[in-house]
Image (tube, rainbow, N blue to C red):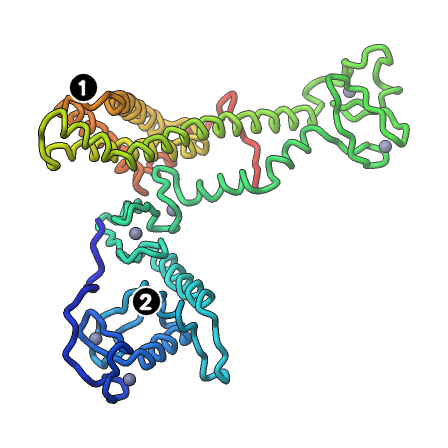
Amino acid sequence: FIAKSGIVRDAPPSEDKECLICNEPIEPGNSVSLPCNHKFCFDCFVRHISIKFLEGKAQFGINCPQANCTAKIYPSKVREVFLITGVTDFSKGGRVIPGEVAVEQFTRLIQEDFIRSKKGSMCYCPHPTCNYVAIRKDLLRKDVRCLCGNTFCFQCGHELHVPATCEMMEDWDKLNNSQSLDDIWIEANTKPCPRCNAPIEKTKGCLRMVCRCSYIFCWDCKKDWKKTHDENRHFFCTTPENQRPSLLESMKAKDFIEYKNLYSSRLDDHKKLVAQARKQLAEIHQKIDAYKQCNKCDDMTAEFIRDCAATLVKCREFLLNSIILGFFSKTSKAKEFFDYQQKELQMSIEELSKLMELPAAQIERMEMMHISTISIQHLEKLIKHFSEDGLERLQESEQPKQLENEITIQWK
Ligand SMILES: [Zn+2]
Ligand SMILES: [Zn+2]
Ligand SMILES: [Zn+2]
Ligand SMILES: [Zn+2]
Ligand SMILES: [Zn+2]
Ligand SMILES: [Zn+2]
């Protein structure tokens, strides 16, 4: 899925003694040679990439200055040079863009292109220090695990989030970062006084609200308390329930907040598991060394332990993101199938996780590899199912009838 871009970094030094731009002899130590074997003086090179950058033509990568040469200059090379020199704009009287600013703008140019080309089949890894290019072979899939160790979504450029969609991630972030939950809570717990409009917060169970304007009303039906309600029964509303719209509203809001909090705490639990799995993978060489000593085997034989640790990370990440999918998905046949597959995955990685905890001497190579393979198979099945195609199927098959406890409140 990932291939290194067609540029080779450590090409043999070129033989040219003259700069291909200004034709002057190149001073040693003041030159730039590109992997395509073309060589330039440093100043000419800087001028070339600066002009391309200022023209806004850097987003597809800057070409080698030599006419007819189609080789691209590494983005990291451009950044490296800009950081030293900054960018001088001669068309604007030599205005200088400081190095760090230029690097940031250059990175953004590349990333904007990344977003624009989301329907394309190639893109740079969006991580600033990475040179890899992702090639999309399966157009239905947008999950990328770069060789640099980072993951990203082909479509939105954020960290990998399959099986949740880009839109779900955006909605979830909005829900967490914005005021919306606060608003829902405030709406559920304060009401404007029917006479003077001052916001009044509900306290405990008492329905008899006394405003500072001295108006007394019922929290549930908003009617004048003295005229319609009993002075001795502060918890009792005389209006029939189905004629109290505010009560239904606040119940819905309360339900929604509880529903959201339930998913948030599930998410927090899973985040811990992901962090654990990543830590385990980062420190896996210790376990590999211990295994090699116990079994007197070579690196190749012990490498399966790293593969298994990587499997665990991938599966844990998937399960984490599937919580967000669950939050936004309604009950349907396709959802039931997904839940079933997900449970299977969950079971096999719990087993794998247990095996990973064992001391090196007790590790059974075949058993661990077997469980890891099964986990990956479940994972692949789920990812395939949740390619765009599968997601459409899921939405189509949603039952139109409303469920008893379905949450219908809008938070946007
Ligand atoms: Zn030159
Ligand atoms: Zn060239
Ligand atoms: Zn990368
Ligand atoms: Zn995305
Ligand atoms: Zn009032
Ligand atoms: Zn009432």
Q: CA distance from mark 1 to mark 2?
A: 52 Å
Return the x and y of residue 193 as percentages of the image width and height: 81, 32
Q: Are marks 1 and 2 in contact (CB under 8 Å)?
A: no
Spot occupied by residue 349 in the image (x, y as percentages of width and height):
27, 25
Query: What amino acid is found at the position of numbered circle 1 in the picture?
Result: Gln
Q: From the image, tell me which residue sits under label 2.
A: 60
The type of residue carrying mark 2 is: Phe
Can you name the residue that lies furthest to the top here? 232
| Res. 283 image quadrant | top left
Q: Which badge, 1 or 2, is on the more N-terminal residue?
A: 2
Residue drawn at x 27%, y 22% as measured from the top left: 357
The mark found on residue 377 in the picture is none
SS label for mark 2 = loop
The image position of residue 261, as x and y in percent, is: 53, 27
Whether residue 26 is visible here, answered yes or no, is yes
Give SS at disc 1: helix
Mark number displayed over residue 362: 1
Residue 25: quadrant of the picture: bottom left
> Counting other residues with Cα less than 10 Å from the Cα at mark 1, is it few (<14), some (14-19), or many (20 or more)?
few
Of marks 1 and 2, the one in the foreground: 1
Say left or right for 76 vs 14.
right
- 17 versus 338 height, above or below: below
Q: Quadrant of residue 222?
A: top right
Question: In the displayed structure, would residue 24 be above or below residue 152?
Answer: below
> In the displayed structure, does residue 229 sit left or right of residue 321?
right
